[in-house]
Image (spheres, rainbow, N blue to C red):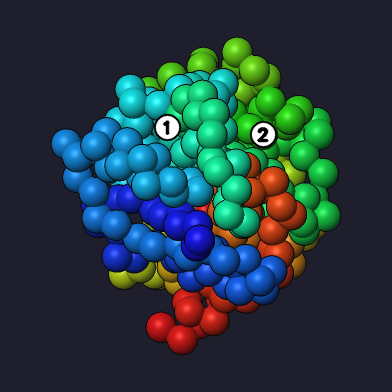
């Protein structure tokens, strides 16, 4: 019987998760299908329980359900510190690729794969984060995941945010796992000059305000790594500025695909075909 996976969100129409996961199942010849469902906050618990009852292989959650899920599932350590769940695992529901009986449900576990997606995106571009000075722009949901994972993996993190208090509060929390400081955007030229890696986790530059950037070429230098997690447009103004400055660039698709690949690994225990998943997403975004 076909195994069903899904992303729940509200709105969810924009989600690229079905594209990348269905491409992976096809490439590996797996009898699985990934769908998107609009689920409201009020219906989240019923929807998760329903998915488990129907033997779904696993779920992703997107806006605005990630935080609410903490009250419904058992979050793992990373989801708990980040304060958001983007991947739900139904352990005990051994993925059904034959007609064997499914048995032994032990609970529902919530993971957050955004941070690991970001770290793997850097690694895939040959960037070593250990002891490197990382400037994270933004202190929202994505920044939380990125900052925790990078600090935990040994980077020296500075979080700079428009609302300084949010950056300071996040840095204080992140210090429980590693090295982190929080500040505002006033000192951006100096912070930029002193960073080995700059990661934009703000929505600045995202469609439709595609001409905006917090950092310009004159503030960067050759050899720096500029990673923009925004993936709409594919090439943001920030990445264009980085190319002008001779910096190494990494776009948001890598992180998007690698966080999805991590979900795939959690659910199936199978190594995901990352290249196939990435190409499927690039084809869809490139054609828009
Ligand atoms: P969020 O929680 O709403 O956080 C938004 C952040 O952007 C906040 O730090 C906010 O600062 C800052 N910001 C917004 N407008 C700004 C402006 N005009 N000037 C300076 N700072 C500004 O959003 P999120 O969920 O973290 O998502 C942020 C972006 O990351 C989105 O574009 C999203 O699509 C992308 N994303 C990509 C991936 C991926 O896999 N590639 C994953 C997750 C998210 P304040 O605190 O001052 O408001």
Q: Is residue 170 left or right of residue 222?
A: left
Q: Can you say whether 88 is above or below 27 in the image?
A: above
Instruction: Report the residue that reaches farthest toward the left.
Output: 42
Q: Which numbered disc covers residue 31?
A: none
Q: Quadrant of residue 205?
A: bottom left
x and y, in percent, of residue 255 in the image: 59, 54
Identify which residue is drawn at 29% across, 57% down.
37
Q: Residue at x 67, y 19 (%)?
A: 178
Q: Position of residue 9 (x, y in %)?
A: 30, 51
The residue labelled by disc 2 is 150
**In this rendering, position of residue 80 left or right of residue 127:** left
SS of the residue at dot 1? Answer: loop
Q: Which residue is mark 1?
A: 84
CA gap, disc 2 and disc 1: 17 Å
Q: Residue at x 54, y 81 (%)?
A: 283
> Is residue 199 among what the camera can see?
no
How many residues crowd mark 2 within 10 Å: few (<14), some (14–19), many (20+)?
A: many
């Amino acid at each position: 019987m076909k195994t069903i996976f899904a992303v729940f969100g509200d709105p969810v129409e924009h989600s690229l998760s079905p594209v990348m996961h269905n491409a992976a199942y096809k490439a590996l010849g797996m009898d699985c299908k990934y769908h998107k469902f609009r689920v409201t906050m009020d219906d989240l618990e019923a929807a998760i329980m329903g998915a488990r009852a129907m033997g779904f292989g696993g779920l992703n959650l997107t806006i605005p359900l990630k935080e609410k899920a903490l009250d419904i599932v058992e979050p793992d350590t990373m989801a708990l510190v980040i304060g958001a769940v983007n991947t739900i695992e139904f352990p005990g529901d051994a993925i059904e690729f034959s007609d064997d009986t499914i048995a032994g449900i032990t609970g529902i576990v919530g993971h957050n794969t955004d941070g690991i997606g970001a770290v793997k995106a850097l690694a895939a571009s040959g960037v070593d984060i250990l002891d490197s000075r990382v400037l994270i722009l933004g202190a929202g949901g994505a920044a939380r995941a990125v900052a925790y994972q990078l600090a935990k993996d040994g980077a020296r993190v500075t979080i700079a945010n428009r609302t300084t208090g949010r950056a300071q509060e996040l840095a204080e929390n992140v210090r429980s796992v590693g090295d982190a400081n929080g500040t505002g955007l006033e000192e951006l030229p100096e912070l930029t000059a002193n960073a080995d890696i700059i990661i934009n986790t703000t929505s600045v530059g995202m469609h439709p305000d595609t001409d905006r950037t917090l950092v310009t070429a004159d503030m960067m230098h050759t050899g720096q790594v500029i990673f923009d997690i925004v993936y709409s447009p594919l090439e943001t103004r920030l990445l264009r500025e980085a190319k002008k400055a001779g910096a190494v660039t990494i776009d948001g698709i890598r992180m998007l695909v690698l966080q999805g690949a991590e979900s795939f690994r959690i659910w199936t225990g199978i190594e995901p075909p990352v290249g196939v998943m990435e190409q499927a997403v690039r084809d869809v975004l490139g054609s828009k």
